[in-house]
Image (cartoon, rainbow, N blue to C red):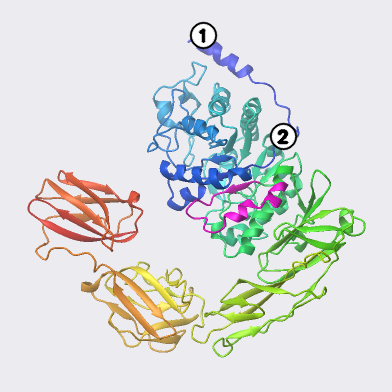
Amino acid sequence: MKQYLQYLIICCLTSSYPSFAPGQDNPYKAPLYWSVYEYCYSVDGAIPESEWLANIDWVDQNLKSFGYNMICIDGWGDDNQYNQDGYRKKHSAEWEQDYAWWSTELQSRGMTLGMYYNPLWINRNAAKSGIKIKGTDIPLSSLIDETEDALWFTWAQVDRPGAEEYVKGYVQYYADMGVRYLRVDFLSWFESGVDKGTIVGPDRPHEHYETALRWMREACDSNGMFLSLVMPNLNNEATTEIQYGHMVRINEDVAYGTWTRFSNFDRGIRFPGWSQYHNAFDGYTYWSHISGRNKMILDGDFIRINTMATDEEKKTVISLHLMAGGPLSVADQYNTIGNDLWLYQNSELLALNQDGFVGKPLSNNPADKFSQIWSGQMSNGDWVVGLFNREDNIENRHLDFSTLGIEGSTKVRDLWAHTDLGAMNSVTANIPPHGCLIYKLVPGDNPLQNQTIEFNSITDVENTINTPQLNLTAIASSGLPVSFGVIYGPAEVNGDKLIFTGGTGEILITARQPGNEEFGAAIPVPVIFYATDSIQPFENLYLLGDATPVGWNIGSPEIMIQNDTNPYIWEWEGELIAGEFKMPTFTGDWCDGVWINSSQPNQTLSATDYIITNGCDGPDNKWRVNASEAGNYMISIDLKNKSISIESTVSSIHFSQTEQHHEFAVFPNPVSDQLYINFAKETSALITIYSPLGNVLFQDEEKGLQTSIDLSGLNASGLLLVKISSANYSEVFKVYVR
């Protein structure tokens, strides 16, 4: 015991790691990488190793050559697998390989493993097993405060002997397997124990927080490791984080994505503590005052391009991350990216990251419109300018190049259009909603002349059936022909004609002139107007009622899908139970919009007609599903032909008429993951699970009086048919999977 106490005293007074020199230049630039976040967030759980590999292959083939050379794990999973020092080995116990194996595999492909973990976390099972802190005789359990009331995590007490060895040893553990990027999360929970007013742990002395960060940074510096700080409070203008981190998060999680999380979420509001700004645009804007070349890197969190509504939004997301000197942390997956891969492959924009470029807004006040104009210099002196529009309308942006110290005219290049503009000494542009223009300014004479486009506004079209097309007219000052394109909306362009394709909605079109050997390209001019289709005077259609999975929830009804080839057809497929339903074109208050109702009260599913009512006026007729009719259906409504079809989709599955109900029990129903089956009189049975179309999703012989089946691996939702066959009985159950 005496020898043990002497060791504790020595550990408190000495350290085998080199001293840290705060304030040094940041040797890193923002990383380009892929993260598991989207998958894990979507299922609220671990990513299977097969999906992990599929995404690695996708990055290897499509993004690695553009500089995305890291694959990063994130939260979720489990820490059931730990080594002799109590350090986590795998993302999930279901994985065959551990982190060390995957790190080696990625290195063989020319990539690295990025690690998500907080070295202050302690695995209680490891501590209970009697594990000693690596390199010491100190029990890991001695770092735990059993009286501490903390949510989710067991935190190492940094004022206890062995804490420094444990924290630094954790970093070293990952470094030894080749990890060079450490993403440390939930820092505010450790520092202050508060998250948006909710108590999640104790409020620790500031020196404890600073000590923990210092240990992490020292261990990272000893191993050439990048330290990313996540969920920090950033108190006192991030003074502590600037000292110890290479990169710091400046906004809430991307979560479900969309423009809301990127730009609109609690826009312009500053909160105390984590996260002081809730959306990425606000965060990048305000915290730009602590960033810069070779300074703190700002982290706007992961990118889910596939959740953005338009190409304009997608380009803005990529552009702001790069203009602010932030990372491009791809969370889109091989099976969610769709046709958006090109946005991550813009070599002219990626050159900003390769250069270590960091831009700044004209104002770091998110409420100031000048915060939407950014600029910065490349290492060779070239300027890059970003004109952004966070608003829902077309906005004008102007920048005089003299404010950047540029005398006279300069060469201007559009980094998204990949075109050179004419000689310019300023830029003025009308920018589409949620859009941007990114220009590179190269000093020197420009042989190309400047040109502009005059494209007048278009009046809203009240009835596209009576006005099926418009003639478009725009004039370029160069006299060169102008072309048009639809950015979004129910229309298409054929030459100088805009042809309505069916449906109601906002239409954004642009006029462009690409230039020639004499003239540079013109700045595109956008025009927005609204077109109403008298047959289909709405943009959305939903399903609502106690016969549907959502019940009478007008705030979140079932979404019907517009047919890809015929915009007048809307479709929905899923389970209908006994009850009623009707179709709103809106969400929110009950009287706020147009309804599609059945022609008669309690209308049968075989009837093909319907009526349209406004708000709470007119008969509140509904379709009725009888108990004997419950099942999976395809609903298709054709607005142009004024008909509706409600067809069962289980007719392809046929079971023997001799099958009767016997002593089997299936529960719960509806079910989320684990389905339980009681056999009662039987000791074994063959269980087969079918999709509504008759595809076999699962089949196995189960023994005993009760069994359970994990449905999460079937990747199925909605109605499933469960057939249970024993030596004496056979029965089919309809089960609804949430």
Please tell me which residue is depicted at 72% across the width and 36% down the height of the picture. Answer: 26
Q: Is residue 339 magenta?
A: yes
Whether 392 is drawn above or below 252: the answer is below
* Residue underneath mark 2: 27
Indicate which disc residue 37 carries. none
Give the magenta part as a residue range.
327-352
Q: Indicate whether 529 appears above or below 171.
A: below
Residue 424 % position (x, y): 86, 62
Of residue 695 and residue 154, the one placed in the foreground of this image is: 695
N-terminal of the pair, mark 2 or mark 1, is 1
The quarter holding residue 417 reads bottom right
Tag 2: residue type?
A: Pro
Q: Which residue is mark 1?
A: 3
Q: Is residue 460 visible?
A: no
Residue 658 at least partly seen = yes
Q: Secondary structure at mark 1?
A: helix
Q: Tell me what residue is drawn at x 75 percent, y 70 percent.
A: 513
Q: Are marks 2 and 1 in contact (CB under 8 Å)?
A: no
Quadrant housing residue 468: bottom right
Residue farthest to the top, as pictured: 3
Q: Amino acid at mark 1?
A: Gln
State the CA–CA distance, disc 2 to disc 1: 43 Å
Quarter of the view holding residue 281: bottom right
